[in-house]
């Protein structure tokens, strides 16, 4: 599956903090590319834990832990298809690096944002 196909396939999904959310979007991409799910280490946690991570701005720590568990390596120069945590409009979001900027999924659907509108907080290479 290509990145474009993954993005198009996500466009019709419904956002849910305890279901398909901003972290699940890049995690699913990693799973498709590597066969490893960076969020598997959180399987079985109660739904309120997801909401708590977001409320306490712990998304970066949680996604970093998942990325490490999936064998991803940090990068300072994310390329197309790499994943990361970005800051956009004052919020941390898990995202995938696309050709035209970072792509993320939230309650409004799929968004592509230009680099001028984001800060890359951390990124990981996806083989």
Image (cartoon, helix red, strand yellow):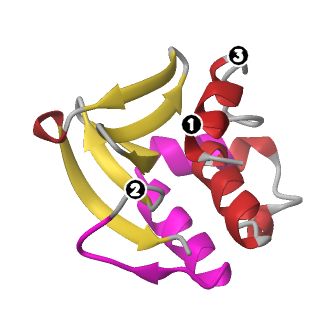
Q: Earlier in the sequence, mark 2 or mark 1?
A: 1
Q: Residue at x 32, y 77 (%)?
A: 75
Q: Secondary structure at mark 3?
A: loop
Q: Alpha carbon of mark 2 to alpha carbon of mark 1: how far?
A: 11 Å
Task: Check the image and report above or below for 14 versus 53.
Answer: above
Q: Alpha carbon of mark 3 to alpha carbon of mark 1: how far?
A: 14 Å
Q: Alpha carbon of mark 2 to alpha carbon of mark 3: how far?
A: 22 Å
Is disc 3 in contact with disc 1, using a CB cutoff of under 8 Å? no
Q: Residue at x 23, y 29 (%)?
A: 89
Write down the region rendered in magenta: 50-78
Q: Residue at x 50, y 44 (%)?
A: 54
Asked if the magenta segment contains residue 77, the reply would be yes
Give the residue furthest to the left.
116
Q: Is residue 60 left or right of residue 21?
A: left
Q: Is residue 78 left or right of residue 46?
A: left
State which mark lies toward you, 2 or 3: 2
Percent x, y of residue 101? 29, 40
Total residue callouts: 3
Q: Residues within 10 Å of mark 2 (few under 14, many from 20)?
A: some
Which residue is label 2 attached to?
80
Residue 76: mark in rendering: none
Which residue is label 3 attached to?
12
């Amino acid at each position: 599956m290509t990145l474009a196909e993954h993005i198009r396939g996500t466009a019709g999904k419904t956002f849910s903090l305890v279901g398909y959310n901003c972290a699940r979007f890049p995690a699913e991409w990693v799973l498709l590319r590597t066969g490893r799910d960076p969020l598997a280490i959180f399987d079985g946690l109660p739904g309120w834990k997801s909401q708590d991570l977001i409320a306490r701005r712990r998304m970066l720590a949680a996604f970093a832990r998942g990325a490490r568990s999936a064998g991803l390596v940090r990068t300072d120069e994310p390329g197309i298809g790499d994943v990361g945590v970005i800051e956009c409009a004052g919020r941390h979001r898990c995202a995938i690096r696309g050709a035209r900027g970072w792509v993320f999924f939230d309650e409004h659907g799929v968004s592509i944002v230009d680099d001028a509108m984001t800060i890359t907080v951390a990124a990981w290479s996806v083989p």
